[in-house]
């Protein structure tokens, strides 16, 4: 039996592993078509926190400076934080974690601190959603007296 160097076989192995022998997974929308954990992005989407101390309401998402739903590339999100009664929380400390639970990694840095804009409005980013798949976003809100977290997930096409 003739032994061939591994580096000669590597391109063939990689091509076989990536192709899967079936093109149906390469169609647009196929990555997220069956994702049941993802929310549908709409401006004004409300994210309650676990103990219902706060609500986070998404106002606008910019991807590479263009208003659109969360997507691959640099994302900057504007959101409002209110208390359980609906009053704005203007002086909270808000951190956002971008995480891919299926891959076991997030963005770098993992946590991004939001900037207070005015009267309970905050901005976070730019953070790079560098690959397609399910992303979970954790909003940790602390107003000095209380701390609570809320989560939302979006599927990003590849």
Image (tube, rainbow, N blue to C red):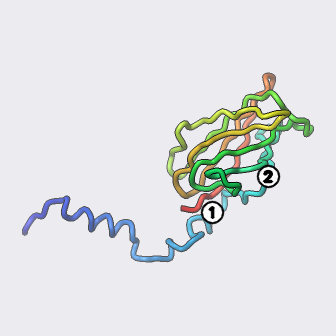
In the image, is residue 143 above or below residue 37?
A: above
Rendered residue at 91%/39% (across/down): 86
Q: Earlier in the sequence, mark 2 or mark 1?
A: 1
For the point 54% across and 43% down, the residue is 107
Q: Residue furthest toward the front?
A: 65
Is the residue 152 above or below the residue 116 in the image?
below
Determine which residue is flagged by label 2.
45
Q: Is residue 95 above or below residue 44?
A: above
Q: Position of residue 2 (x, y in %)?
A: 7, 67
Residue at position x 64%, y 52% in the image: 63
**Would residue 28 appear left or right of 60 to someone viewing this image?**
left
List x then y, in percent, for residue 95: 67, 34
How far apart in space, not on screen, are marks 2 and 1 (Cα)? 18 Å
Residues at circles 2 and 1 in contact by the CB criterion of under 8 Å: no
Judging from the image, what secondary structure is the residue with disc 2 in? loop
Q: Residue at x 40, y 71 (%)?
A: 20
Q: Nearer the viewer, residue 78 or 40?
A: 78
Crowd rating for badge 1 (residues with CA inside 10 Å; few <14, some 14–19, many 20+):
few
User: From the viewer's perspective, is 122 left or right of 16?
Assistant: right
- Where residue 77 sits, quadrant-wise, is top right
According to the picture, the residue beneath numbered tag 1 turns out to be 35
* Secondary element at image label 1: loop
């Amino acid at each position: 039996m003739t032994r061939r160097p591994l580096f000669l076989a590597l391109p063939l192995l990689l091509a076989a592993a990536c192709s899967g022998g079936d093109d149906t997974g390469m169609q647009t929308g196929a990555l997220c078509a069956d994702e049941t954990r993802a929310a549908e992005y709409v401006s004004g989407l409300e994210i309650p926190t676990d103990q219902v101390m706060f609500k986070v309401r998404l106002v606008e998402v910019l991807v590479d400076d263009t208003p659109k739903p969360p997507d691959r590339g640099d994302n900057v999100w504007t959101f409002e934080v209110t208390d359980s009664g609906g009053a704005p929380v203007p002086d909270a400390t808000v951190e956002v974690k971008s995480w891919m639970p299926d891959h076991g990694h997030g963005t770098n840095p993992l946590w991004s601190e939001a900037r207070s804009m005015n009267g309970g409005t905050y901005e976070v980013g730019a953070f790079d959603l560098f690959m397609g798949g399910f992303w979970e976003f954790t909003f940790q809100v602390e107003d000095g007296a209380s701390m609570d977290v809320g989560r939302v997930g979006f599927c990003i096409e590849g």
